[in-house]
Amino acid sequence: MGPLVPDIISSNLNFIMAFVIGILFGMILEQAGFSTSKKLVGLFYGYDFTVLRVFFTAGVVAMTGVMGLKHFGLLDINLVYINPTFLWSAIIGGLIMGLGFVLGGFCPGTSVCAAAIGKLDAMIFIGGSFIGVLVFAEGYPLFEGLYKAKNLGNPRIFETFNIPETMFAFLMTLIAIFAFLAVSVIERKVNGLEREPFRIDPYRAALAAGAVVLVVLSLAFTDKRNDLLKNIEDKAFVENYKLKEISPDQFALCIMRMEECDKFQIFDFRDEETYRKMSFPKSTLFTLENLFEKEPVKLLNIKHRTTVFIADDEMTERKMAVVATELGFKRIAILKGGVSEFSRQVLEFSSAGTPATNEEEYIKRFRTKAKQLIPVIIENNKPQGGVKKTQKRVIGGC
């Protein structure tokens, strides 16, 4: 399953879900006729474009789904694996794959589907696939130079052409619709069928409605990360955004009585060097990117715990807190004035002058004590560092 940000599906449940989805996927392939080699190779001869329709539809729906999950902050895109592009091996491998498809009548996935219903030609095809894998594995030292030639990294088309992701999705959906119309014309001509008069029936109406929905969604699912980054560049918007604040004195009290503040954690958005020099108890080094990732946000989802965002200045805290709040996280607070103001009021407190009121007397006593204790607490505190990420991109795919 995909790396969903709310950990809805556990690692163990993942295997069960994959098993069930695999069975359903095989059933759909068989029902679509993908266990029949004549239907599959029809793509190359022009008499049946079911393969193009199914895979184009799957690609557009998957693309829109990924964009939707990412838009609502439900998918950690950093854990989604993108196959690296080795140009020459892709071209040569594609030619071999295409030739094998035409001659054998199957691709690796559809051959397994056909073998599952007892087709002998599919079983032979699978046997040939194993032989090919064995030859490549044993001869890899000979093929390695060609295999790794012209490494283009992990390019994405919309980045290559420098266009918005939503625009690429919109164009891709339009291309799919145009392709469906074009291959219908080709099929009729190749099969010698007369052009049927235009009519609206439930099947065509459902297809048209689905196409319209996909076109609209491809434009609607903007990159939420980019939208939020644009919003926090608006200083007036950030300053007027309603956020919970805690004063330097409240922050100091929690540090001195950390055992009593068990429902309190600190996310430190300063740079790592500054964090290492002065890190507070129960603080984790955090970055803006962490707010969009699967494992770090688990800390934000701990129930009944207030998370205090700290940075050198209050504006940075506010920006990070606005992003977190807009992503749907609750119980977020910021340190009023930032760490710089906390240092000025508490750590660098000067007791010169006589307090005029009882409140000023209490503040003086508290800050004098805090000035003595907190540096010792910080000195004895071992920095936790950043979020420890155990999950990695899962390599795979068809």
Image (tube, rainbow, N blue to C red):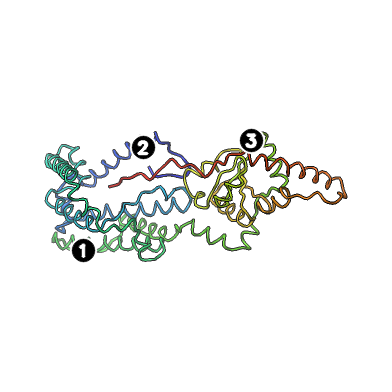
Give the image quarter of residue 381.
top right
Query: Who is closer to the viewer here, 65 or 154?
Result: 154
Specify which label sits upstream in the sequence, 2 or 1.
2
| Mark 1, secondary structure of its residue | helix
Mark whose residue sits in front, 2 or 1: 2
Quadrant the N terminus occupies: top left
| Label at residue 354 | none
Q: Residue at x 58, y 50 (%)?
A: 274
Alpha-carbon span between mark 2 and mark 1: 39 Å
Q: Residue at x 78, y 50 (%)?
A: 350
Q: Mark 1–mark 3 contact, CB under 8 Å?
A: no
| Residue 359 spot, x, y in % from top left | 83, 46
Mark whose residue sits in front, 1 or 3: 3
| Label at residue 262 | 3
| Mark 3, secondary structure of its residue | loop
* Residue on which disc 1 sits: 185
The amino acid sitting under disc 3 is Asp
Answer above or below: position of 149 versus 139.
below
Relative to 310, 113 lies left or right: left
* Residue on which disc 2 sits: 17
| Residue 342 spot, x, y in % from top left | 69, 50
Give the image quarter of residue 111.
top left
| Mark 2, secondary structure of its residue | helix
Query: Who is closer to the viewer here, 223 or 150?
Result: 150
| Residue 105 spot, x, y in % from top left | 14, 49
The amino acid sitting under disc 2 is Met
Crowding at dot 1, Cα within 10 Å, few <14 / some 14-19 / many 20+, comes out as few
Q: Residue at x 41, y 63 (%)?
A: 164
The amino acid sitting under disc 1 is Val
Crowding at dot 3, Cα within 10 Å, few <14 / some 14-19 / many 20+, comes out as few
